[in-house]
Amino acid sequence: MSTREGSVAVVGDKDSVLAFKALGVDVFPVDNEDDAKERVHMLARTHSVIYVTEQVALWAATYLKRYSARPYPVVVPIPSASGSQGLGMAGIKANVEKAIGADILFDKEDK
Amino acid sequence: MAKLNVNPTRMELRRLKNRLKTAVRGHKLLKDKSDEMVRRFMLYIRENKRLREEVEGELQAALNSFMLARATSSDATIEEAVAMPGTTVRLKTSSKNVMSVEVPVFEIEKGEESELYPYSFASVTSELDDAIASLSKLMPKLLKLAEVEKTCNMLADEIEKNRRRVNALEYVMIPQLEETIKYITMKLDENERGATTRLMKVKSMLEERKD
């Protein structure tokens, strides 16, 4: 059991993340690929949970892959103010396919 | 199937038989592990899907009202309103072991509870109140989602890795060992038969000479 400083951060375009500021979450608006990568990379050391908008998740995908093997930081894609592109659901689907070999979770609902 | 490159000796045979026993046992254990991991994974992934659907819907609504609030007030007003938050979100983070995968667990550490709305109601519209109220209600769910989704991610990776191990044992290691054991057994038997025949031949030659 390890304990680590537990702070929460949100990274994304300003419209989507500003609202989180009122909750006392650390908010970092970014609007281009380089900033997004650098920001996520820095936050990974200081924060244990990082919410990123789908756009940022795409921009920083190579970095995010690195964190997938250890418990912290937890990086979660969330939809932005302009709507969801389905990245989060795609992630779940990919997980199911990876683990089970076929997508049995979403198939059922379609029928 | 390729056999291993070993000397056909009794010692080697004994060693390989032991290795085969270990491999078969390991294969069975790993297969059981894989079954259990998939079972756990299914529990988590269902919850993950449910949570994500809920969170995405509610977050969308909250962000929409926030957008409305931004549209009705000036940028500076909104930024000033949220600039000094009255609450903080702190987490107590630890990890737990799910099928020998370290997954994150956290609980919300309640800071000193003060005002949820860190601004005066006179300066902004009610949309902002709505947005912040629903966001703060959503926060525990968002954190739960983070926890569950990470768990699913890590479990999925581990299941895949484990499956490779099981397959390597089942389709490569075990057949190879069996093949090699068979080869050595046959070679040893052949040697024995050869030796017997030689003895018989020698004996008959000796008898011929005596006559």
Image: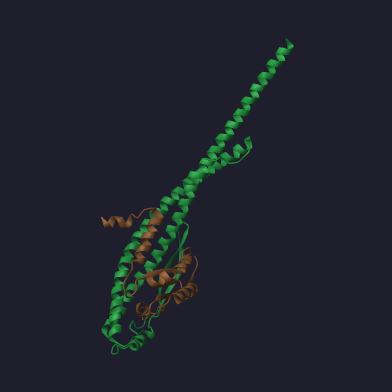
Chain colours: A brown, B green
**Residue A66 at x, y percent in the picture:** 48, 66
Q: Is residue A72 visible?
A: no
Quick one: quadrant of the C terminus of chain A? bottom left
**Residue B63 at x, y percent in the picture:** 31, 76
Location of residue B124 (image quadrant): bottom left
In the rendered view, would you say A107 is above or below A84?
above
In the rendered view, would you say B15 is above or below A96?
above
Residue at 47%, 69% (x, y): give it.
A63
Q: Is residue A4 visible?
A: yes
Residue at the bottom extreme?
A: B122
Q: Is residue B6 left or right of residue A32?
A: right
Near-viewer residue (B158 or B137): B158
The tally of labels here is 0
Near-viewer residue (B100 or B206): B206
**Residue B147 at x, y percent in the picture:** 40, 66
Residue at the top extreme?
A: B211
Residue at 33%, 62% (x, y): give it.
B49
Q: Is residue A64 left or right of residue A19?
A: right
Residue at 55%, 34% (x, y): give it.
B182
**Residue A51 at x, y percent in the picture:** 40, 72
Near-viewer residue (B52 or B8): B8
In the rendered view, would you say B26 is above or below B83?
above
